[in-house]
């Protein structure tokens, strides 16, 4: 039986090819687009690695904060509604921490080397 590579393995292999073999041979606009493609594949890779855990943690925090069950989308819509209506604000226990955690997670996927990311964790 032949094992097939996972989506993550495929994404990482294409990104490695671009970074290690293609980009050193490219110049100008083509080199720029190869860097953009490699960066996009990096985001996809990190989303595949981290996305499910980050979503689970976000849903758990929202369930506690809102004191109700639902999908992540439903809970986020409810959070937005309560903030918009003034029922929740930064003084609400746990809200500021939740918003900070969501932001850190998004930056961790999108820009993991952003200097402020490590500072925000401390």
Image: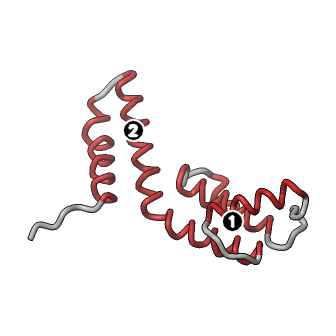
Q: Secondary structure at mark 2?
A: helix
Q: What's the CA distance linking mark 1 and mark 2? A: 33 Å
Residue identifier under label 2: 37
Residue holding disc 1:
75
Residue at point 55% right, 50% down? 111
The answer to whether residue 15 is left or right of residue 39 is left
Indicate the position of residue 27 as horizontal and vertical percent values: 34, 24
Residue occupying the point 80% across, 67% down: 95
Write the residue at 89% across / 64% down.
87
Which badge, 1 or 2, comes first in the chain's sequence? 2
Q: Nearer the viewer, residue 30 or 83?
A: 83
SS label for mark 1: helix
The residue furthest left is 1
Label 1 crowding class (10 Å Cα cut-off): few <14, some 14-19, many 20+? many
Q: Where is the C terminus found, in terms of image quarters?
A: bottom right
Counting from the top left corner in percent of width and height, residue 51 is at 50, 62
Q: Is residue 10 above or below residue 39?
A: below
Q: Quadrant of the N terminus?
A: bottom left
Image x and y of residue 12, in percent: 32, 54
In this rendering, position of residue 7 left or right of residue 40: left
Instruction: Answer with the quarter of the image where residue 17 lies.
Output: top left
Q: Nearer the viewer, residue 89 or 67?
A: 67
**Quadrant position of residue 31:** top left
Q: Is residue 28 left or right of residue 116?
A: left
Near mark 2 (Cα within 10 A), the count class, few <14, some 14-19 or many ≥20, is some
Q: Residue 45: x and y, percent?
A: 41, 55
- Vertical order, 36 against 72 (above or below): above
């Amino acid at each position: 039986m032949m094992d097939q590579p996972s989506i993550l393995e495929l994404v990482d292999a294409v990104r490695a090819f671009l970074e290690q073999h293609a980009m050193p041979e490219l110049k100008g606009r083509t080199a720029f687009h190869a860097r953009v493609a490699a960066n996009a594949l990096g985001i996809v890779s990190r989303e595949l690695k981290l996305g499910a855990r980050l979503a689970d943690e976000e849903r758990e925090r929202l369930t506690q904060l809102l004191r109700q069950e639902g999908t992540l989308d439903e809970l986020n819509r409810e959070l937005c509604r309560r903030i918009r209506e003034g029922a929740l604000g930064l003084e609400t226990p746990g809200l500021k921490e939740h918003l900070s955690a969501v932001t850190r997670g998004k930056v961790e996927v999108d820009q993991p080397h952003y200097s402020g990311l490590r500072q925000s964790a401390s």
